[in-house]
Image (tube, rainbow, N blue to C red):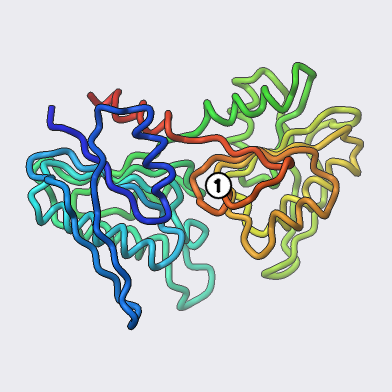
Amino acid sequence: MPQKIIFATQRYQYLKDRILALAPHWEEGKLEIRDFPDGEHYHRIRSQVHGKEVIVLGGTIDDKETLELFDIAHGCIQLDAHALNLVIPFFGYSTMERAVKSGEIVKAKTRALLFSALPATNSGNKVVLMDLHVDGITYYFESGVRPVHLYGKDLVKEAAMELGGGEPFVLASTDAGRAKWVESLANDLNVEAAFVFKKRISGETTQITGINAEVENKNVIIYDDMIRTGGSLIHAAQSYLDAGAKSISVITTHGIFAGGGFEKIKKSGIIKKVICADTHPNALSIQDDLLTVKSVDKIIVDYFQHQG
């Protein structure tokens, strides 16, 4: 099998280092990066990639990171990489997966088409994604790109058992949209599942109209694929408390915490603990006892080792 070499965008160096600690036989890809006064960016691949299986790690967390990921990948292809694997722990614009109003641009699709435009290597190109907001996003990739959707189920189950502390708990979601995923996790954990019913009042406001399960005097652990501003999470948590829940803890894969989201969660005073994965670098910038960050490094390494 070709030697594996891993590169990362600037904001995902932390995850590359964690992955290399688990897979020391992989080669660390070296880059030279400079920023010019006019806002342009210089990249040079310093490692030999000819004939190697290249892994390029980066989340599409903003447009700069997205283009950096594309540029590094394209550079590796031009240097005759044998295979290309784009590992995107957090796929930005995943909530813009369909047009609701006339004229809306489906940016989950345009981002997928951007990476589909990369020339194919001899062994083809793969895109490895994690806990997508919508499974159907994988179908937006074209030109022979092979999408792989990794699920952080084991990490979520481990976090739930940690938060449960050996006591009975209910695994809950913030809305009915995640109910099937939460129900699957609850079945694996042999616990009850719960979700709230919501009615949208406006583009920014929803009203919770009911809860499908009995949560009175029970510890509730909420799972959601991502936390952005925390508003929906706080509303759901308050609803479970109003229904008699004893305590509320939270698990999320993607801790984005935009617009002071974490501070909002902490200030609410109704959430006992939050556990998230390190798929988004924002989570690593928060140093607070309320938050525990677990790495997806093993999930990524296990996938590639399973592939041979």
Residue 84 locus on image (x, y percent): 20, 45
Q: Nearer the viewer, residue 207 or 78?
A: 78
Residue that appears at 31% across and 57% down: 69
Which image quadrant is residue 42 in?
bottom left
Q: Nearer the viewer, residue 83 or 57?
A: 57
Q: Nearer the viewer, residue 39 or 206?
A: 39
Residue 188 locus on image (x, y percent): 59, 20
Q: Quadrant of the N terminus?
A: top left
Residue 173 lies, with reference to residue 2, above or below; the image says below
Residue 32 lies, with reference to residue 48, above or below; the image says below
Using residue 187 as the reference point, say whether residue 199 is left or right of it.
Answer: right
Residue 80 locus on image (x, y percent): 8, 49
Using residue 22 as the reference point, say whether residue 237 is left or right of it.
Answer: right
Q: Quadrant of the C terminus?
A: top left
Residue that appears at 37% across and 27% down: 22
Residue 302 lies, with reference to residue 232, above or below; the image says above
Q: Residue furthest bottom?
A: 38
Q: Element under label 1?
A: strand
Residue that appears at 47% across and 62% down: 98
Q: Nearer the viewer, residue 128 or 297?
A: 297
Count every numbered label the image shows and give the total: 1
Which image quadrant is residue 242 in?
top right
Q: In the rendered structure, which amino acid carries the disc numbered 1?
A: His
Which image quadrant is residue 163 in?
top right
- Residue 277 in view, yes or no: yes
Residue 82 locus on image (x, y percent): 11, 41
Label 1 belongs to which residue? Answer: 254
10 Å crowding of disc 1: few (<14), some (14-19), many (20+)? many
- Residue 97 in view, yes or no: no
Using residue 119 as the reference point, say whether residue 219 is left or right of it.
Answer: right
Residue that appears at 12% across and 45% down: 48
